[in-house]
Image: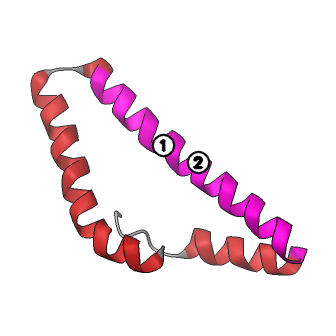
Amino acid sequence: MIVFMMRTAKHLKGDIEGKVGSLATKGSALGLFVFVFLLVVREGVETVLTLFAVSLNSTELMSFLGTLLGVGHRSPLA
């Protein structure tokens, strides 16, 4: 997953910026809202599923450390 995201992040950022720019120039406020809402929901679902999987396979300490490392890392989209 890490290797995939390292390769995909470069193109993903441009795709997202292009889509947001396209929706903004069209004046589609509803389309822009739905697009951003779905991006945020997707990130939330990924976080919940990752934390749930970690808690099933390790102790609470490892889960806590993994959560800190995951939240503390710099996103390639930022």
Q: How busy is the neighbourhood of tag 1: few (under 14 within 10 Å), some, or many (20 plus)?
A: few
Q: State yes or no: discs 2 and 1 in contact (Cβ < 8 Å).
A: yes
Q: Is residue 36 left or right of residue 25?
A: right
Q: The magenta stretch spans which residues?
A: 31-60
Against 15, residue 2 (above or below) is: below
Which numbered marker is on residue 18?
none
Quarter residue 32 falls in:
top left
Residue 57 lies in the magenta stretch = yes
Residue position marked by numbered label 1 in the rendering: 40
The quadrant where residue 74 appears = bottom left
SS at mark 1 in the image = helix
At a point 72% along the width and 62% down the height, the residue shown is 51
Q: Residues within 10 Å of mark 2 (few under 14, many from 20)?
A: few
Q: Amino acid at mark 2?
A: Gly
Q: Position of residue 17 (x, y in %)?
A: 20, 49
Q: Characterize the magenta stretch by its predominant secondary structure.
A: helix
Image point 52% across, 50% down: which residue? 43
Residue 16, given in percent of the width and then of the height, sits at 25, 49
Residue at the (83%, 73%) spot, across then down: 57
Question: Could you tell me which secondary element the residue under label 2 belongs to?
Answer: helix
Q: Is residue 36 left or right of residue 53?
A: left
Residue 38 counted in the magenta span:
yes
Residue of label 2: 44
Q: Amino acid at mark 1?
A: Val
